[in-house]
Image (tube, grey):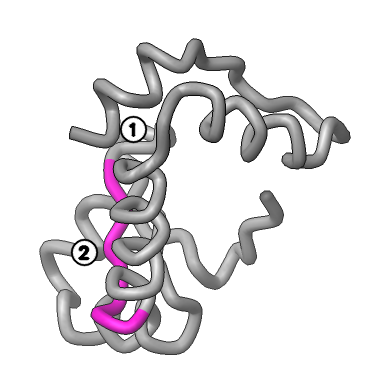
Amino acid sequence: MNISAEAIVSNSEMIKNYKACREKAENFGKVFVLKNNQPDAVLFSVSEYERISVFIEYMESLEDEDIAKVLATLPGIGKRREYSIERLKSDLK
């Protein structure tokens, strides 16, 4: 995942300038919040949340073998965490 530096804000910036951060989320779909230079949270725009929710609801409806098929289609390039089907199902709940 490529993250624009403009879509990253500090925790203190989020607290002091929530409105500006919310506007960034509208522009970029999401804003990554750092605390002590470490990822702490993500602020999604409503439209991005709705888009992701559709995917999550779809994944929740699948059987284990169908989830495995979806996972097999994901790109293998770059570093990605590997999750078991059980972990994915528990994360989706």
64 or 71, nearer to the observer: 64
Q: Which mark is residue 36?
A: 1
Q: Which residues are magenta?
A: 41-47
- For image coordinates 38% across by 54% down, the residue present is 58
Q: Image quarter for residue 9?
A: bottom left
**Mark 2 lies on residue:** 14
User: In the picture shown, does residue 17 fall above or below 65?
Assistant: below
Q: Image quarter for residue 90?
A: top left
**Callout 1: helix, strand or loop?**
loop
Q: CA distance from mark 2 to mark 1?
A: 13 Å
- Upstream in sequence: badge 2 or badge 1: 2
57 or 34, nearer to the observer: 57
User: In the picture shown, does residue 80 fall above or below 55?
Assistant: above
Q: Position of residue 51 (x, y in %)?
A: 39, 73
User: In the picture shown, does residue 85 fall above or below 34?
Assistant: above
Is disc 2 in contact with disc 1, using a CB cutoff of under 8 Å? Answer: no
Q: Image quarter for residue 23?
A: bottom left
Q: Position of residue 63 (x, y in %)?
A: 41, 30
**Callout 2: helix, strand or loop?**
helix
